[in-house]
Image (spheres, rainbow, N blue to C red):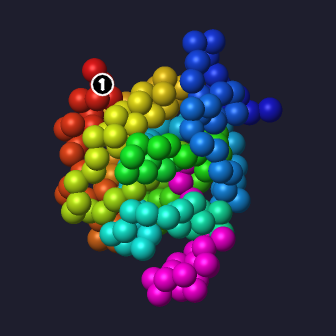
Amino acid sequence: MEDNPNAVGSDSLNLDADGWLPSARRLPSPNSDARPPGTLIDLLVIHNISLPPGEFAGDWIDDLFLNRLDPGAHPYFVAIAPVRVSAHFLIRRDGRLTQYVSCEQRAWHAGVSVFMGRERCNDYSIGIELEGTDCIPFTSAQYCALADCTRQIRARYPAIVPERIVGHSDIAPGRKTDPGPAFDWGRYLKGVVS
Ligand SMILES: [Zn+2]
């Protein structure tokens, strides 16, 4: 038996023992698997996504993460419908939170990535998607939900110090641009550490 470096403390009231947040809508994604044994979860990655790009309606993101995206529903979907991806969480424009993958499991959000010389960030990170684009301001409801979600994650995984909360663009530079210049890091982190 490996020691679990992410063992649940007695004061862990929020994320349940299996790594699910009771307050989130739960839609388990098959695009997930086990982390390498003994992995300390010590990185949080912030993303944005919208489907089709720039549109904030419908349940297309759920469909993508659940491998049921209809390629006939929009020309953009043809190329991405076969892609197998997920994130632990999605925060919609109105602040609604959905969880697709247990935090104890590995979600497939980062792709080819490196943080401080360490590759395969999916192994040791948690990924949160914000519904949005790089250049459209995110909503107050999203900042509130993101701060709340982050606080609950950090209560369980204290190795995720503020310096280890990054954007997808930080770990996949040149390949990814999200969460983008419209994301207000100062506003977000102030809500996390206060
Ligand atoms: Zn991303």
Q: How many marks?
A: 1
Q: Which residue is drawn at the image coordinates 43% and 51% (left, top)? A: 92
**Residue 75 horizontal side relative to residue 138, left or right:** right
Query: x and y percent of residue 170 in the render?
Result: 31, 56
Q: Is residue 19 visible?
A: yes
Q: Secondary structure at mark 1?
A: helix
- Circle 1 crowding by C-alpha within 10 Å: few under 14, some 14–19, many from 20: few
Q: Does any atom of ligand 1 lie closer than 8 Å to the CB of label 1?
A: no
Which amino acid, by three-letter code, is at mark 1? Val
- Residue occupying the point 41% across, 30% down: 148
Q: Position of residue 147 (x, y in %)?
A: 36, 33
Instruction: Provide the residue span drawn in magenta.
Output: 68-88
**Quarter location, residue 181:** bottom left
Q: Quadrant of the N terminus?
A: top right
Choose between 91 and 6: the one closer to the eye.
91
Does 35 sit left or right of 91 as displayed?
A: right
The residue labelled by disc 1 is 193
Q: Residue at x 53, y 67 (%)?
A: 60
Residue 103 found in image quarter: top right
User: 84 and 144: which one is in front?
Assistant: 144
Main secondary-structure element of the magenta-colored stretch? loop
